[in-house]
Amino acid sequence: MRKLQTQGVHHITLTGADRQSTIDFWEGVLGMPFVFDQPNLDDPDEGHVYFDPGDGRLITVFTREDRKGTRTRTPTDPGCVHHLAFAVSQATFWQAVERLDERGIRHSGPKDRGFMDS
């Protein structure tokens, strides 16, 4: 089978909770600027918010006002996203850990993985 030649990842879209808690997390905790929002063009009951991770790409999140965030573990079923990893400086890494801790958001780090911290 012939390989499909991609030019990289254009964007990643995740399913989120309501609009404001989504913005609070991605912009307020992770520091990714909120770019804009629009209705989800495939489901008008959902919003579609866009964030700038700093590399010229986008992270987008489908929101719905009747969906609330959960503190339970993200599903690990086939097809689910296990995690996203961002390239950041050591200082930014520790700022993120501090922000998560301040808000009581559980995380698995910091961990020395030998070739990187996570």
Image: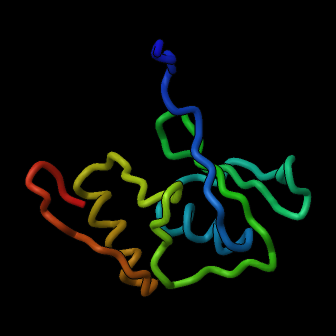
Query: In the rendering, at what x and y percent does residue 72 appear?
Result: 49, 84
Which image quarter: residue 95? bottom left
Q: Quadrant of the C terminus?
A: bottom left
* Colour scheme of the picture: rainbow
> Can residue 31 be seen by looking at this rendering?
no
Query: Which of these two is toward me, 101 or 112?
Result: 112
For residue 35, above or below residue 23: above
Taking the view exactly as shown, the residue that stands out farthest to the front is 1
Query: In the rendering, at what x and y percent does residue 105 appear?
Result: 43, 81
Query: In the rendering, at what x and y percent does residue 47 appear?
Result: 81, 59
Residue, x 78% and y 52% (percent of image)? Answer: 37
Taking the view exactly as shown, the residue that stands out farthest to the right is 44
Residue, x 53% and y 55% (percent of image)? Answer: 79
Taking the view exactly as shown, the residue that stands out farthest to the left is 114
Number of labels in the image equals 0
Apparent side of residue 58 relative to residue 29 in the rendered image (left or right): right
